[in-house]
Amino acid sequence: MIKVFFFSILFLTISFSQNTFHQLDSYCEQYVKRNSLPSLSAGLIMDNRIVWTSYTGNTDLENDIPVTKYSLYRIASISKSITAVAIMQLVEQGKINLDSSARKYLPFLPQKKWSFTVRQLLNHTSGIRTYKNDEEFNNKINFKSVYDVVMYVAKDSLDYQPGTKYVYSTLAYNLLAGIIERVSGLSYQEYLQKNIFDVAGMSSTKLDFYNKIIPFRVKGYQKNAQREFENSPLADLTIKFPGGGILSTVEDLLKFGNGLLQFKLINKQTLDSMLTETVLNGGRKIQYGLGLDFGVDNYGRKFFGHAGGGTGFVSRITCYPEENVAVAHLINCRDRNLINVAEELAAIYFGEKISFPKFSLSDTLTKTTVKFSIDSALTYWQSVELKKDTNFILSSAEIQDFGIDLLTLNKTKDAILVFTRLTETDSTFTPGFIGLSDAYNREGNKGMALRNLKKAQKLKPNDVSIQSQILNIEKEEK
């Protein structure tokens, strides 16, 4: 009797797992299909064991190369978490004091109006600027060393007094790489390999040198206004290895998350310190720690991790400390309205009921306009709304995107039709009036542009951007 009971429980457990994994696979397939993405790699690790992975789509659209477990994606800003862990290892060893001036470890830095600390570099309150011009998406400068890029960043004045603002700065993380090199005596790349990649078992992870031959490297894409794929711009990532230039597979990312959960990379006290809110000088609290974000997800579970969004790539790793689970996803296309897939996959695994991915209404309407006409698109839009078709994302923001696509395609009159209908159907949606104003302004109708901006201002009276646009048009009319 006991044997029968045991096998019944075992059978139910296996059936539950198979059903759950089937749901996870199905979600990934539908997400790629309905968002029209090149590929999605995703996976989940629990208690030191990778329990599920999924590989959907192509890493190279031109050559029809399918994604595999070996596919190397640019993980973008998840690189910051890796760099931050490296710094915290050296803090544990007593080699770095977080609240010491960065110049203590990088004495060659030019003197600034204010001093900033290692901690402020980690939590984006150092005063160091963010990107300008083409540095993020189209950078062509090849830096030969960490020192070179540190000096390139450090030559500029600080944008604000350290500690008074939170300004997300990938460039600031170059100084952290410089500190790692000075303190450890190893190159940034050598330090990561020896103390993070090897320790966590991340056998594939490496820096993304664009001019090197790197097997299994995934190609990145973006979409144009017609919602067609384009190759993402060439970017030399030597300007941001520590903050956004690392390549990895989904399995390696899971191992990194597991290394944090199992305290293989840093101890619990150190991890807890990384998951403490940043407090600005004025007392304002920021939900970002030291190279990690954290909080409670939509289902009430505590998490920590990091998101990434680089040239042609989107990524996310999310760790659930109470469940001892880490989930990660990698996408080789940077596009609008991509949700946190990792969180949704975790919810499925934990047994939550979630809505499966929907088609983008804006994409469908834009493609219909390009292929047929604006009348066909408007008719389609009306039919979808009348039927309340749950296969589509039905929101004013979707129609706003459609209108923006039309403006980008220089279909100004069509955009006016769309934004007019949008503001008639949703008179509380401020971006609808801003979009309609923009369309009229491009057509040269300053009066209608101003009228719609003032309608937007009534909805958001304290919006500085709207006020600025109103002043600009009023000046032009004088």
Image (spheres, rainbow, N blue to C red):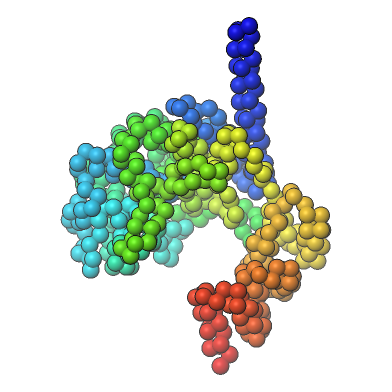
Residue 241 in the image: above or below residue 114: above
**76 lies left or right of 402:** left
Residue 96 on image: x %, y %: 21, 46
Q: Taking the image as drawn, is residue 398 in sight?
A: yes
In the rendered image, residue 428, in percent from the top left (x then y), is placed at: 66, 70
User: Farthest residue in the front direction?
Assistant: 1
Q: Residue at x 34, y 31 (%)?
A: 264
**Residue 18 appears in which quarter of the rendering?**
top right
- Image quarter of the C terminus: bottom right
Residue 291 lies left or right of residue 315; in this view the side is left
Give whichever of 199, 429 is nearer the camera: 429
Q: Residue at x 52, y 45 (%)?
A: 297
**Quarter occupied by the N terminus:** top right
Expressed as whole percent of the image width and height from the top left, the position of residue 448 reads 67, 83
Q: Is residue 155 above or below residue 117?
A: below
Which residue is drawn at the image coordinates 19% and 43% (left, top)?
Answer: 95
Determine which quarter of the picture holds residue 473.
bottom right
Residue positioned most to the bottom: 478
* 411 is higher (above) or lower (below) than 97: below
Residue 116 lies, in percent from the top left, at 25, 59
**Does residue 207 sit above or below 425 in this rendering?**
above
Q: Can residue 67 be seen from the camera position used here?
A: no
Q: Residue 459 lies in what quarter of the image?
A: bottom right
Taking the spot 53% from the left edge, 27% from the top edge, the residue there is 51
| Number of marks | 0
